[in-house]
């Protein structure tokens, strides 16, 4: 079987398995949520009299018109039925809006934070990895390794708070949190990603303001994630630099820098692509700790609030959305890997 | 390999990289800070815009919904309150009702069932729809019929709402309720434009608001809200040019830092107790203003009178005797509350310190005597579980303090065992009688002493022997049933004469102190912090922060 054919079969099989994976996640989340407590009690704080609580329970699909509890199985199939019609339900924590609308509102903030954060992580991690791998056994190599361990080990909220303390409170170079100052009109556009919308509308003031607010949360996320990329690049680059073709290139008189950047690095980046894709998918589900630390109104923060208030519909909807992203991301990574690495066969 | 040449090249690369990085940082910082004018105290705030007359308020509370027919939490109602008017309202710092969209207090029929209210002329909604009695009737009917969370406040009491004239509203009640005018001051019973809203089951408008208030909604974002002054407002114009609300989602540390760096002009809800203490101390040095007011939120201990040994009133009285409220206020609240000796807070003149009179504070000797009378001793101690919902660090501290106090002072005759459970589970199981005792708090729906009594002490179905099967007392986990209490509650709800009503509340509080199904602990103090340049910052007795009086 040819390579491209094999790849097609592989993608087809993955796509066929995706609904099964999504169904497993939906079922698990559905059952686990219902084991955690009554959303009526959570949302009302026990303030509603029984009749009013019953009305709320009916609205949430937990009770029938007579106030009797709807059996779990019926709730489950009812939810699955709606899901097949792409109806994620109504979000109680976001003012009775459809869940898909809530995701649409908050997801762009998460995308913005994730993309910029990962970009910083990639640039910093790969750069340090290259320096470290090209100087084995030296202080630079040791420093790179130490950086990788420390950045991976540090708690993200602690680093975030430290950066806030230094750059926002003491130096006042950056704002403490939020996406945009409340006294200015936020960029209006299709995507909801402020940096992109402001560029598309040509408003560079808004663009730089959005970047200004993005800086600290992205730096926090970026620096902490860069450790992962640093370690992978360093290890793989070191291995690659020992390969025969590299020795041959050196023997031919090719400059060390050219060997490093034009030959060895490309091969060393293959596993980085995989990690980048998986990290991107995982962050798009909401970098909760970063978002909470910087009061960033992303999907992670929204999910956190929905979980506290037992907003079943929002939690389930966000988890389904996140699972879908992971499935798509993992298929995309496999495709990219197959494209860039001819050794890979499925 | 030529290490020297490599090192120079390497150094150059590193230097270029660092230089580029620094240039990017410089661009970001300098271009970003061009948008920000200096905040108060000469500090560089994140957009306080001191020159434009607008006030920036910081909070951690994100509104859930802007529809008054569904909003039932302070974080949503406080925004609605500032964009709307109700028939009646409270002036900041006062608990007397004053007419707002009404022009006078209601005329009540002799049977207490019919309220005739004259409404104001010359009022328009934010969408230019004229306001009249029909619009007010629409708003109240919508509040009831859309069956949002707070709808029970009116639907349980109101029979019909009609416009009996262009500027006359008539409300008929199902049964007499003397506190009804206070209910009409609830933020959610505001007037909304009939053009912008619909009556229908769960037909809510989550992200817009069209009312008659001094502010209209300019922008409703995911972490900020902007209010512009409504130019056609019928009443006194706000002292500022608009409000910017910055929401530091569930992060008190950010709110604290934002205030201390001058990024916000006013900080309100919710700061941690140690942050409040810190800000209060620095306010004394003149750094900023700390404004506090007597709150209307009460904290109390519920005793499940169905469970042994709490079915014995002597045991309950013993527990009431052992509570040292002064110590709780000092150690747990850092003085940010005040001891409470009745279920009705001191905000109301009917409040009587019945628990102080009957039991005092930390009356260990009396507690021991009562427990011995009930058959307990150091060798046969009373072991009592004390529960609290896990989301409250303050109640955790209070529970730990009570436990430690009992251990230290009671000679082993009383032992508290502290337990916690997650909030949703707690509230779900409370009405099933799962907890012998619990530490809870209550904030009122409307400012009437009835709202501190009826939800806890009334029982619609039960008996003195078996306790309460159905009613507020069962829902709140007390299971307390007393015929006289039920009768007194009904009486005060019917009684229109304030002096006579006060007498009935006095009897209710006396009975409460005798039966002790509930022990009041403390009453909150509300705090708002404002920069030095701010004036007109205060808190409404309903815990709402009025925006229109603030000026920079």
Image: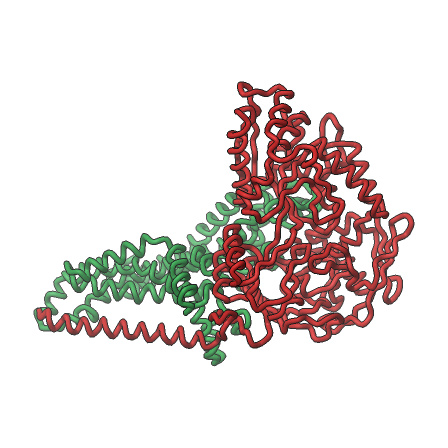
Chain colours: A green, B red
Q: Residue B61, relative to residue A67: is it above or below? A: below
Q: Nearer the viewer, residue B280 or B12?
A: B280
Q: Position of residue A122 (x, y in %)?
A: 32, 65
For residue A221, say whether it is visible: yes
Q: Position of residue B302 (x, y in %)?
A: 64, 36
Give the side of residue B85 with respect to residue B333, left or right: right
Q: Residue furthest right?
A: B110
Q: Nearer the viewer, residue A250 or B526?
A: B526
Q: Position of residue B391 (x, y in %)?
A: 53, 45
For residue A101, say whether it is visible: no
Q: Residue at 23%, 57% (x, y): give it.
A: A145
Q: Position of residue B440 (x, y in %)?
A: 61, 41
Q: Residue furthest bottom?
A: A202
The image quadrant where one finds the N terminus of chain B is bottom left
Res B357 → quadrant:
top right
Q: Residue at 68%, 65% (x, y): give it.
A: B83
Q: Nearer the viewer, residue A251 or A238?
A: A238
Q: Residue at 53%, 62% (x, y): give it.
A: B286
Give the side of residue B3 with respect to residue B535, left or right: left
Q: Nearer the viewer, residue A337 or B331?
A: B331
The image quadrant where one finds the C terminus of chain B is bottom right
Q: Residue at 54%, 69% (x, y): give it.
A: A182
Q: How many marks?
A: 0
Give the side of residue A17 with respect to residue A57, left or right: left
């Amino acid at each position: 079987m040819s390579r491209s054919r094999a790849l097609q079969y592989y993608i087809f099989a993955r796509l066929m398995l995706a609904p099964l994976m999504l169904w497993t996640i939906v079922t698990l989340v559905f059952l686990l949520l219902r084991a955690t407590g009554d959303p009526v009690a959570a949302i009302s704080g026990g303030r509603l009299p029984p009749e009013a609580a019953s009305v709320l329970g009916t609205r949430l699909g937990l009770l029938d018109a007579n106030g009797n509890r709807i059996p779990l199985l019926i709730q489950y199939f009812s939810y699955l039925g709606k899901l097949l019609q792409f109806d994620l339900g109504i979000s109680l924590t976001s003012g009775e809006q459809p869940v898909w609308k809530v995701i649409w509102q908050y997801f762009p903030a998460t995308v913005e934070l994730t993309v910029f954060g990962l970009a910083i992580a990639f640039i910093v991690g790969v750069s340090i990895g290259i320096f470290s791998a090209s100087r084995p056994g030296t202080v630079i190599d040791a420093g790179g390794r130490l950086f990788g361990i420390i950045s991976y080990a540090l708690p993200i909220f602690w680093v975030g708070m430290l950066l806030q303390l230094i750059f926002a409170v003491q130096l006042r170079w950056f704002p403490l949190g939020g996406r945009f100052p409340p006294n200015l009109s936020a960029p209006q556009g299709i995507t909801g990603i402020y940096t992109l919308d402001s560029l598309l509308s040509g408003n560079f003031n808004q663009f730089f303001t959005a970047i200004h607010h993005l800086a600290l949360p992205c730096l926090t996320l970026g620096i902490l994630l860069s450790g992962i990329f640093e370690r992978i690049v360093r290890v793989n680059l070191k291995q690659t630099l020992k390969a025969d073709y590299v020795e041959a290139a050196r023997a031919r008189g090719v400059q060390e820098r050219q060997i490093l950047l034009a030959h060895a690095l490309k091969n060393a980046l293959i596993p980085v692509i995989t990690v980048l894709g998986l990290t991107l998918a995982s962050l798009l589900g909401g970098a909760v700790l970063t978002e909470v630390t910087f009061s960033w109104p992303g999907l992670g923060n929204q999910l956190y609030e929905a979980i506290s208030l037992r907003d079943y519909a929002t939690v389930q909807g966000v988890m389904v959305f996140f699972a879908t992203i992971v499935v798509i991301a993992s298929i995309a990574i496999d495709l990219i890997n197959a494209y860039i690495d001819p050794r890979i066969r499925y | 390999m030529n290490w020297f040449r490599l090192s120079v090249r390497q150094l150059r690369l590193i230097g270029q990289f660092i230089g580029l990085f620094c240039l990017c940082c410089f661009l970001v910082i300098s271009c970003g800070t061009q948008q920000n004018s200096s905040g108060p105290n000469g500090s560089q705030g994140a957009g306080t815009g001191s020159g434009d007359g607008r006030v920036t308020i910081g909070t951690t509370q994100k509104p859930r919904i802007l529809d008054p027919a569904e909003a039932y939490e302070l974080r949503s109602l406080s925004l609605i309150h500032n964009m709307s008017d109700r028939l009646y309202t409270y002036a900041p710092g006062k608990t007397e009702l004053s007419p707002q969209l009404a022009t006078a207090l209601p005329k009540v029929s002799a049977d207490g069932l019919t309220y005739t209210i004259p409404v104001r002329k010359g009022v328009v909604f934010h969408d230019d729809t004229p306001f009249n009695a029909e619009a007010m009737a629409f708003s109240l009917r919508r509040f009831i019929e859309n069956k949002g969370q707070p709808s029970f406040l009116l639907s349980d009491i109101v029979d019909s709402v009609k416009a009996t004239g262009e500027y006359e509203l008539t409300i008929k009640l199902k049964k007499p309720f003397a506190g009804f005018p206070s209910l009409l001051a609830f933020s959610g019973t505001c007037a909304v434009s009939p053009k912008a809203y619909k009556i229908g089951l769960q037909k809510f408008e989550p992200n817009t608001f069209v009312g008659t208030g001094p502010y209209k909604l300019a922008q409703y974002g995911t972490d900020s809200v902007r209010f512009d002054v409504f130019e056609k407002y019928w009443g006194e114009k706000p002292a500022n040019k608009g409000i910017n609300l910055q929401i530091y989602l569930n992060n008190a540390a950010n709110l604290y830092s934002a205030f201390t760096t001058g990024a916000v002009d006013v900080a309100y809800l919710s700061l941690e107790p140690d942050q409040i203490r810190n800000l209060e101390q620095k306010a004394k040095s003149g750094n900023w203003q700390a404004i506090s007011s007597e709150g209307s939120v009460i904290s109390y201990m519920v005793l499940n009178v169905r469970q042994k040994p709490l079915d014995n009133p002597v045991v309950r009285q013993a527990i009431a005797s052992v509570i040292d409220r002064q110590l709780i206020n000092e150690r747990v609240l850092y003085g940010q509350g005040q001891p409470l000796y009745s279920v009705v807070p001191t905000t109301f003149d009917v409040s009587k310190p019945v628990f102080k009179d009957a039991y005092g504070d930390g009356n260990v000797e009396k507690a021991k005597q009562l427990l011995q009378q009930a058959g307990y001793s150091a060798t046969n101690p009373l072991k009592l579980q004390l529960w609290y919902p896990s989301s409250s660090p303050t109640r955790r501290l209070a529970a730990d303090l009570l436990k430690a106090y009992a251990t230290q002072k009671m000679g082993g005759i009383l032992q508290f065992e502290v337990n916690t459970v997650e909030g949703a589970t707690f509230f779900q199981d409370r009405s099933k009688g799962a907890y012998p005792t619990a530490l809870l708090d209550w904030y009122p729906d409307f400012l009437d002493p009835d709202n501190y009594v009826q939800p806890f002490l009334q029982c619609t179905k039960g008996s003195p022997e078996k306790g309460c099967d159905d009613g507020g007392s069962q829902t709140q986990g007390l299971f307390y049933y007393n015929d006289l209490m039920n009768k007194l509650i009904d009486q005060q709800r019917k009684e229109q004469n304030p002096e006579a009503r006060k007498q009935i509340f006095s009897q209710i509080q006396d009975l409460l102190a005798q039966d002790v199904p509930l022990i009041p602990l403390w009453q909150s103090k509300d705090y708002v912090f404002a920069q030095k340049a701010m004036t007109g910052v205060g808190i409404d007795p309903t815990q709402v922060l009025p925006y229109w009086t603030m000026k920079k």
